[in-house]
Amino acid sequence: MGLNIDFSISINGVGISEELKKRVISLKISDSAGIQSDSCFIELDDYDDSLPLPRSEAILVVSIGYKETGIRELGRYYTKEITLNGGRRTMQIYGHAVSKAMMSEKDKSRSKEKLDSVLSSMASEYGLDSVIDLEYHDEELSDAQIGESDISYLTRKAVDLGAVSKPTASKLLFANDMSGASVTGKKLQPVIINLSDITDYSCSLKDSENGYATESNVGTVYAEWQDKSSGVVHIVHAGTGEPERKLPQRFSNEKE
């Protein structure tokens, strides 16, 4: 016996009616990997031109599941674009997990601040809960946020530390993207998906000079850091062999 799909959508805290749910033609959630913003797409039947237009930055909360097992909230999204199609009589709503407020540029010194405290403060400002990987709790910052939004700053720090940071599912996340563990350090169990469980899939293998691209295709990586007291620029490296790559930014200490 199959399961019956169920879902709910709320706009600025108000759930859409059962009658409006019948107008939903398609609903797509993109839970993007890495630092890419999560997004949602909703297409509605507007056959009688009666659907009200959601306001810009209206908060969309989408939950999906099955009637037999319940639904689960997948995320909070901010309305970014609305498309009306007169021929098909449809309304298409596009939302992203990053709000306009999160993109405001700021100038702040972050020297001596703990990453955990900075993330918590930022999350609180946007009405989100902060979630940080245990290994980064005591990470001490040593730079400044100059002309950067909070999201841009966190993204830069995540790239530096080999992590991922982004708003997702009503949380502001900062976690190791290659650990195979949850933010609490618990090992994640693999989920087996059989071909019978899916309707479609695609797989891409990127060709490179040395074959399919893997971590082994990066030989040596160089980085510069400058001692603030002496002004001396030091060069450190990781890995061996070709190809060689130099990171464009200059860091303020060797740990970074």
Image (tube, grey):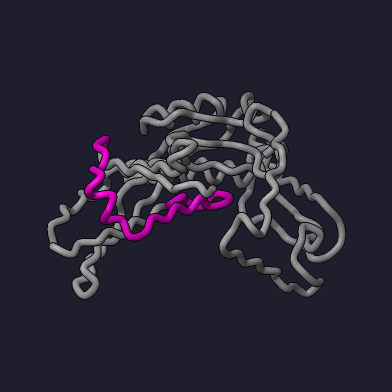
Tell me where residue 225 appears, x and y as whole percent: 68, 44
- Residue 229 part of the magenta segment: no
Q: Which of 2 and 181 is in front in this view?
A: 2
Residue farthest toward the right in the current orientation of the protein: 241
Corner quadrant of residue 16: top left
Which quarter shows the C terminus?
A: top right
In the rendered structure, the answer to whether residue 186 lies left or right of residue 105 reads right
Corner quadrant of residue 70: top left
Tell me where residue 116 appears, x and y as whole percent: 55, 26
- Give the vertical position of 105 relative to 108 (above or below): below
Q: Which of 227 and 91 is in front in this view?
A: 91
In the rendered structure, the answer to whether residue 209 lies left or right of residue 160 reads right
Res 105 seen here? no
* Total numbered labels placed on residues in the image: 0
Q: Which residue is drawn at 46% across and 34% down?
A: 171
Res 32 seen here? yes
Residue farthest toward the front in the current orientation of the protein: 1
Q: Which residue is drawn at 64% across and 58% down?
A: 196
Tell me where residue 222 appears, x and y as whole percent: 75, 54
Q: Which of 89 and 151 is in front in this view?
A: 89
Q: Which of 181 and 166 is in front in this view?
A: 181
In the rendered structure, the answer to whether residue 166 lies left or right of residue 225 reads left
Q: Residue at x 50, y 42 (%)?
A: 166
Highlighted range, magenta: 13-39
Tell me where residue 199 appears, x and y as whole percent: 56, 62
Q: Residue at x 27, y 35 (%)?
A: 13
- Give the vertical position of 253 relative to 91 (above or below): above
